[in-house]
Image (spheres, grey):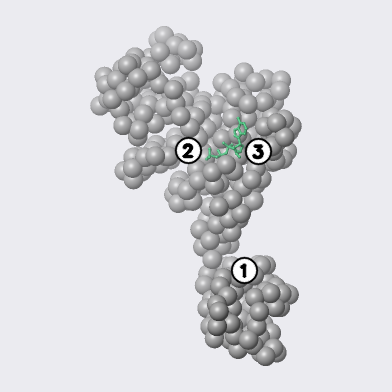
Amino acid sequence: MIHVENLTKYYDRFCAVDQISIDINKGEIVGLLGPNGAGKTTTLKMLTGYFKPSAGAIRVNEYTIDDHPLEIKRMIGYLPETSPFYKDMLVYDYLEYVSKIKGVKPSDRLPRLRYLADLCGLNQIMHKTLGELSKGLNQRVGMAHAMMNDPDILILDEPTQGLDPNQIVEIRNIIKKIGQEKTVIFSTHILSEAEATCDRIVIINRGKIVADGRTEDLKQAAGKKTIIQISLLHTSADAAQKTLSAIDGIESVDIVTQTDDGMVTVKAHSSGTVDLREKIYKTIKATDWTMVEFLQEAKTLETIFRDLTRQMN
Ligand code: ATP
C-alpha cells in the first residue's frame, strides 16, 4: 500500500533522514520507534506531503507523491506532534468546522461526527471548549480531526507524549480500534508504547532504519541473544576486549569498569543463538588471567533498542 524508497531529507547540509526504504501493507499498525532527533517527525512529514523530500520516492497505492500529492494527502489523516487548536471553540463546533474544510457532504456531517464521537470517546465533551480539555482529551479530538474524511491511512506523531498512564491506555485502545480497518503509522520514543500497540516495529536512529520486524519476531529474536559479563584480574581492558572480540559469535565487547586494584569487567554481546560460554571459558583458560565473575543474561527488546540507538544518548 505504501512504498518508500531511499527517502532522504537534508536540512541545509545536515542529513536528518538517510535513504529510508520501507513497504507498509494495508491494515498494519506500524510503530516508528527512535530516540529524540532520530528523524521520525521528518519522515512522517514527508509521508504526509508536508515536507518535500530531498531525494527518494513515495508511492501510495497507484499514486506518487511527486505527481499526485493531493490524492495522497486525501488518503492520509495526520495528527501532528502539536495540534494548533482554536481554544475558544466548542469541540462540536470545531469538528463541524473540520468536516466542512475536509469536504464532508452536508448530509454526512452529523452521522460522521456521531461516529467519531463514539470512536474517540468524545460524547461527554462535545459542548466543552477546546481550551478547557486535558491533553489526553485534546489528543482524542485531534484523532477525530485526522479521521474526519475517513482516510485509509492514519499517521500520528507521538500521540501519547505527555499523557498520564490512563490517557495513554485510552489512546492506545483508540489506535487499536482504528487499526482494525485502517493502516496506522505512529511515532514514539518509548519502546513499551510500540510493543503494546503495534503489529510491526521499525526502529530508526540517526535518520536510518536499524531494525524492522513484526513485534513478536523482534521479541523472540532479542530473547535468543545474550550478554555475558566477565570480571578478570591480571589483564588490561584493551587485552580483554581484543581477545574476547576475536571469538567467533561475539558481536562486540564493552568495557564496563576498570578498578584501581586491577579488576577489569567487560560485557560481551553475542551475535547469534549459539551458546558461547564454553568458547569464552577456554579462551580465558589459555591466558594467565584470573576470572572472578561470569554472568550470562538474555537480551530483551529493551536492551536491543538501547544497543541500536545508544550512540544518541
Ligand atoms: P523528536 O522526537 O525530538 O521530535 P524526531 O525523531 O521526530 O525527534 P526530527 O524532528 O525529525 O526527529 O529531527 C531529526 C533531526 O533533524 C534532528 O537532529 C533535528 O534537530 C533536525 N531538524 C528537524 N527539523 C529541522 C529543521 N527545520 N531545520 C534543521 N534541522 C532540523
Quarter of image, ligand 1: top right
Q: Quadrant of the N terminus?
A: top right
Task: Tell me, for residue 16, which label it has, or none.
Answer: 3
Kindly identify which residue carries mark 1.
254
Residue 141 percent across, percent down from the top left: 38, 26
Q: What is the three-letter code of the residue carrying label 2?
A: Glu
Number of marks in the rendered image = 3
Q: CA distance from mark 2 to mark 3?
A: 18 Å
The correct choice, above or below, for 279 with respect to 196 in the image is below
Residue 260 percent across, percent down from the top left: 55, 79
Kindly identify which residue carries mark 2.
158
Residue 182 is left or right of residue 124, and the answer is: right
Question: Mark 2 or mark 3: which is in front?
Answer: 3
Q: In this orientation, which residue lies closer to the viewer: 63 or 259?
A: 259
Q: CA distance from mark 1 to mark 3?
A: 28 Å
Look at the numbered disc 3 and say if its residue's Cβ is closer than 8 Å to ligand 1: yes
Is there CB contact under 8 Å for labels 2 and 1?
A: no
Q: What is the three-letter code of the residue carrying label 3?
A: Ala
Residue 108 percent across, percent down from the top left: 41, 14
Q: Quadrant of residue 253?
A: bottom right
Look at the numbered disc 2 and say if its residue's Cβ is closer than 8 Å to ligand 1: yes
Question: Callout 1: few (<14), some (14-19), or many (20+) C-alpha neighbours within 10 Å?
Answer: some
Question: Mark 2 or mark 1: which is in front?
Answer: 1
